[in-house]
Amino acid sequence: MSKSTNVYLETVKDILKIADKHKIDKEKVERFLVPNRVVDVKIPYTQNGKKMVTTGFRSQHSNKLGPYKGGVRFHQNVTRDEVLALSLWMSIKAAIANVPFGGGKGGVTIDPKTLSENELEELSKNYARAIFDVIGPHVDVPAPDVNTNPKIIKWMVEEYIKIAKERGTLLPENELYATFTGKPIESFGLEGRTEATGFGGVVVLKELIKKLGISSKNQTIAIQGFGNVGFFFAKFAQEAGFKVVAVSDSKGAVTNGSGKFSDLDIPLVMSCKLEKGTLAGCYCAGGVCDISQGKTILNEELLKLPVDILVPSALENVINENNMDTIKAKIIIEMANGPVSPAAYDYLTKKGVIIIPDVLANSGGITGSYIEWKQNLENKKYKKEIVLLEIETIMSLAFNNIWSVKESEKVSTKEAAYLYALKKTLDE
């Protein structure tokens, strides 16, 4: 069973427990947990000149609030259960973010690293062709996910438009482009989409510290994971006045070696990482990179640092029963999916740690997708500043909606988020 499915099962348990506690109609909840439809398709492709066939999926969980929405992943371990699980999660996220989407997810069981670029393009187009009849700008809107990217989405949308025109579609081309989000900017994509998830997480953090009545100045942050999400979270947090004192990639973390935290130079750390291929040796502060002033520590050690705010933005279950009693941060922002295990969540919440759950913290991604979709439907081109401003407005409202439920029901932020999403999706 994949990690994603494990996270899903925990989500289902949480939802059923919350529904029972708050006396929400059990039959309605159980109906909601079952997807509207899961489509299985056969995908022909070529590998080293040999014709092959693999399986693809598209799970359409709920379209009550709008078209199905969710990424397409290419991975050798993709299963029907996994995409079903993740489509439920997308329904929850869309409801929390208050964007007019339901939940969807797609995948192809393939290791894309074994394919040449031409073979990957053929596979991508064949997947788009196979699911053509069940997607569309007002029906189901796929996006990139694990091992897919704007280039792959460009191939898919081009194939989709080609078939639509062959079949005599009445939709204008700009609407056809709205069938996929996460496209390259030059192919009707969105400026600011790359930054959206990390930026949205910082919007939520800023709203939280406002509620707590504290200043961002000198609040220290450690970020586990320095990919796209972690980097932009670090960048925007620093610009908002927070002190980012430790960051990590899969090989380890960098922080100050003297025992006294100093603010990392985030753009320089990223430049160094791109040059070296790893963060090791990339202790950059005050405009210079000098590893003698810093030290490399293990990812596990980063989680234990005495910082104010911890941001796990890499893997699932990194904070668990084995290390939960070593966590010193008073705020955790879940930018990865399921980085705090259920047992650790309960333990830390009882200790007074405020944990902003993934379904709220990282929903800047679906928010950015909504703005790209809207841009295409309106046949407009939004500037990055406008996009980030709209993400800020949407994410601030989402946070305040959840916080209001948290306060009125006297529950954790995670319980409040699920409760809000359930009431919104089950309201008839």
Image (spheres, rainbow, N blue to C red):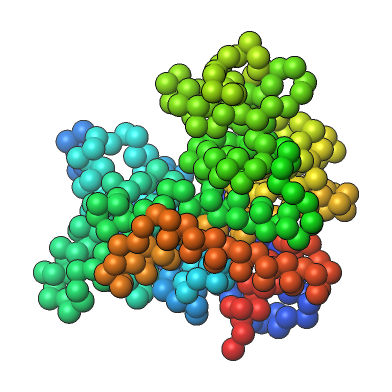
- Which residue appears at 58% of the width and 78% of the height? 425
Task: Evaluate whether residue 269 shows in this view.
Answer: yes
Q: Is residue 111 above or below residue 134?
A: above
Q: For this view, does 163 lie left or right of residue 411?
A: left
- How many badges with numbers are in the image? 0
Q: Horizontal and vertical percent for residue 246?
A: 65, 30
Q: For this view, does 354 lie left or right of residue 420?
A: right
Task: Evaluate whether residue 87 shows in this view.
Answer: no
- Which residue appears at 22% of the width and 63% of the height? 160
Q: For this view, does 218 lie left or right of residue 236?
A: right
Q: Horizontal and vertical percent for residue 271?
A: 45, 26
- Which residue appears at 58% of the width and 36% of the height? 225
- Which residue appears at 36% of the width and 57% of the height? 383
Q: For this view, does 220 lie left or right of residue 80?
A: right
Q: Who is closer to the viewer here, 348 or 383?
A: 383
Q: Who is closer to the viewer here, 254 or 334?
A: 254
Q: Is residue 92 above or below residue 155?
A: below
